[in-house]
Image (cartoon, rainbow, N blue to C red):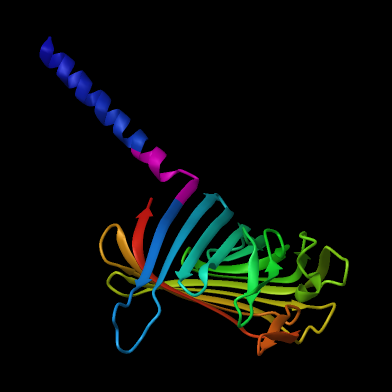
Amino acid sequence: MKKHLLLASTALLMAIAPVVAQEDTTKIWTIKGENTFLINQSSFTNWAAGGVNAFAGNLMFNYDFNYKKDKWNWDNKVLAAYGQTFQKETDWRKNDDRFALNSLLGHQINQKWLYTFFLNFNTQFVNGYNYDNNGDGTLTSSGLSPAYLSFGPGIAFKESDNFKINISPAAARFVFVTNPDVDETLYGLDPGKKSRFEFGASLDAYYKTPIVENVTFENILRLYSNYLEKPQNVDIDYTANLFMKVNEFISVNAGVQLIYDDNTKIPTIENGVEIGSSPKLQIKQILGAGITYKF
């Protein structure tokens, strides 16, 4: 009797096993995430060459929610980052402040090409200031000031999740400045207006590749040309990130972001006095070692 029960149980387990494996391979959602806390610190005591004590801390959340079923793909990335740096002479100041949502819905034409509809939203969390030589700050940005919303149909080439390019020849873009204390003209808005509408072409490209073992290089490029005003002046937003894995939890991250927007005016300060504003290349660099948790 016992022998027959054992054989029946074994047969039942063998019958169930293929069903469980099939469910795992047919899941339509893939969720990945990274939580990173970076620290950068320098200290000087009786140092003949001189130096400034400094400390910086940055917190970053990077999540991917990807859907795939039949010929449909829906890739979503949410990025949130905030950081501050401290120096004795300047006290605490933020060195990073970002929130971005990027969404791409695609229907396959063939193995690598898709009809698409994209949506991008970018803003920040807290106030930002432009500081003069005396350390006095002028408010230049805040939460939802500015905020950028872009969307439109297009076509995409997708080699993998690590290499994809989306082109939209009919992309709408809105620029919002909701805080009345922020000068809206710094972001191309007319005086007294809270939003600006643009219509043009956009290109979004993403490429991530390993360089050597435990070292990965990530590239994010966004281009936008406004048909309605100076289409030859292409807005550029390029980010390069270098991820170096020490072990399962410790990492070293380095990043640089370059932005040029013909409608964004950067104040020019000489001898502590603002003498005007004009479009300029914006550069941001971050380097730190810290803790990264992935799932």
Nearer-the-camera pick, 35 or 215: 35
Q: Return the residue found at the far top.
A: 1
Locate residue 77: give its quadrant. bottom right
- Identity of the residue drawn at 35% across and 35% down: 20
* Rendered location of residue 171, percent (x, y): 75, 68
Inspect the magenta stretch and tell me whether residue 23 lies in it: yes
Vertical comparison of 198 with 194: above or below: below
Nearer-the-camera pick, 211 or 134: 134
Left or right of residue 247, residue 144 in this image: right
Locate residue 291: give its quadrant. bottom left
- Identity of the residue drawn at 50% across and 45% down: 28
- Identity of the residue drawn at 73% across and 82% down: 262
Locate residue 218: give its quadrant. bottom left
Inspect the magenta stretch and tell me whether residue 179 lies in it: no
Nearer-the-camera pick, 95 or 263: 95
* Rendered location of residue 267, percent (x, y): 70, 82
Vertical comparison of 19 with 145: above or below: above
* Rendered location of residue 243, percent (x, y): 37, 70
Vertical comparison of 268 with 155: above or below: below
* Rendered location of residue 78, percent (x, y): 55, 56
Nearer-the-camera pick, 13 or 42: 42
- For the record, the magenta segment spans 21-31
Vertical comparison of 35 with 130: above or below: above
The number of numbered discs placed on residues in the rendered structure image is: 0
The quadrant of the image that shows the N terminus is: top left
